Image: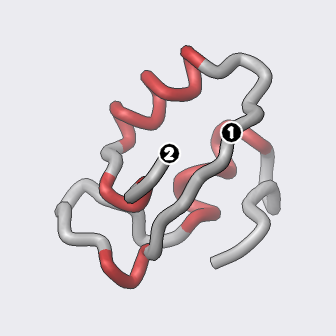
Amino acid sequence: MDEAQELSPMAWRMVMRRAPTRSMTVVGDVAQTGSPAGARSWGQVLDPYTGAGGARSG
């Protein structure tokens, strides 16, 4: 998924429900988030789904 930094928490829940194996390619730059509901860090977005420290970068 491209421009993933723009997804809101609700959108992330929708994506994760549709990818139960959590296997996906996520591309985005949190420094370019334009949406007030967008990501401030990958850990903030992904840790609820992968466990603490699950984000690989950013």
- Determine the image quadrant of residue 51: top right
Q: What residue is shown at x 38% (from left), y 41% (from top)?
A: 9
Q: Which residue is mark 2?
A: 1
Please provide percent x and percent y for residue 33: 29, 71
Q: Earlier in the sequence, mark 1 or mark 2?
A: 2
Query: How many neighbours does mark 2 have within 10 angstroms: few (below 14), some (14-19), or many (20 or more)?
Result: few
Is 25 situated above or below 23?
Answer: below
The numbered dot on residue 24 is 1
Question: In the picture provided, is 54 more to the left or to the right than 13?
Answer: right
- Do the residues bearing badges 1 and 2 touch, measured as CB atoms within 8 Å? yes
Q: What residue is shown at x 43% (from left), y 74% (from top)?
A: 30
Question: In the picture provided, is 45 more to the left or to the right than 10?
Answer: right
In terms of secondary structure, where does tag 1 sit? loop
Q: Amino acid at mark 2?
A: Met
Please provide percent x and percent y for residue 52: 79, 55
Q: Amino acid at mark 1?
A: Met
In terms of secondary structure, where does tag 2 sit? loop
- Determine the image quadrant of residue 16: top right
The answer for how far apart the CA atoms under marks 1 and 2 are is 8 Å
Query: How many neighbours does mark 1 have within 10 angstroms: few (below 14), some (14-19), or many (20 or more)?
Result: few
